[in-house]
């Protein structure tokens, strides 16, 4: 099963193909397809992680707002 996005990237490399092949070989990949597939997977993973962190931050802000609403009196009483 071939990923069309990876194939598109490889066909659009043109002059950078040799550079990317060297880079892939240096990183231990035996072909460009695996290198770009892994690169896209990592990017998707990072994007999902960022979304997860944004959700967590939103939940924290809601909790802070709720706590500040509960606190109607001063802290010394």
Image: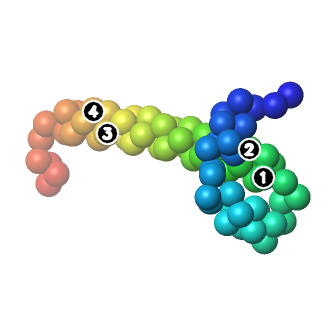
Q: Which sits earlier in the primary sequence, circle 3 or circle 4? A: 3
- In three-dimensional space, the C-alpha distance between marks 2 and 3, rounded to whole angstroms, equals 36 Å
How crowded is the residue under tag 2: few (<14 C-alpha within 10 Å), some, or many (20+)?
some
Q: Is residue 36 left or right of residue 12?
A: right
Q: Residue at x 13, y 36 (%)?
A: 72
- Mark closer to the chain start, 4 or 2: 2
Tell me the crowding category of disc 1: few under 14, some 14 to 19, or many 20 or more residues within 10 angstroms, Cα based: many
Identify the residue position indicated by label 3 in the image: 61
Helix or strand or loop: what does disc 4 sit on? Answer: helix
- Between circles 2 and 3, the one closer to the viewer is 2
Residue displayed at 14% across by 54% down: 76
The disc, 3 or 1, on the residue closer to the chain's N-terminal end is 1
Instruction: Please report contact status of discs 4 and 2: CB closer than 8 Å, yes or no.
Output: no
Q: Residue shown at 68%/57% (left/top)?
A: 17
Q: Which residue is mark 4?
A: 66
- Name the residue that disc number 1 marks: 32
The disc, 2 or 3, on the residue closer to the chain's N-terminal end is 2
Q: Nearer the viewer, mark 4 or mark 2?
A: 2
Q: x and y percent of residue 6 in the render?
A: 70, 39
Can you tell which of label 3 and label 1 is closer to the viewer?
A: 1
Q: Is residue 16 above or below residue 53?
A: below
Q: Position of residue 29 (x, y in %)?
A: 83, 59
From the image, state whether disc 4 or disc 1 is nearer to you: 1
- Place of residue 65 in the rendered image (x, y in percent of width and height, measured from the top left): 25, 36
């Amino acid at each position: 099963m071939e990923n069309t996005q990876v194939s598109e990237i490889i066909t659009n490399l043109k002059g950078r193909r040799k550079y990317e092949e060297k880079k892939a070989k240096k990183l231990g990949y035996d072909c460009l397809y695996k290198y770009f597939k892994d690169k896209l997977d990592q990017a998707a993973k990072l994007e999902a992680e960022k979304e997860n962190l944004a959700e967590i931050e939103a939940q924290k802000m809601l909790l802070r707002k709720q706590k500040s609403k509960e606190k109607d009196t001063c802290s010394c009483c």
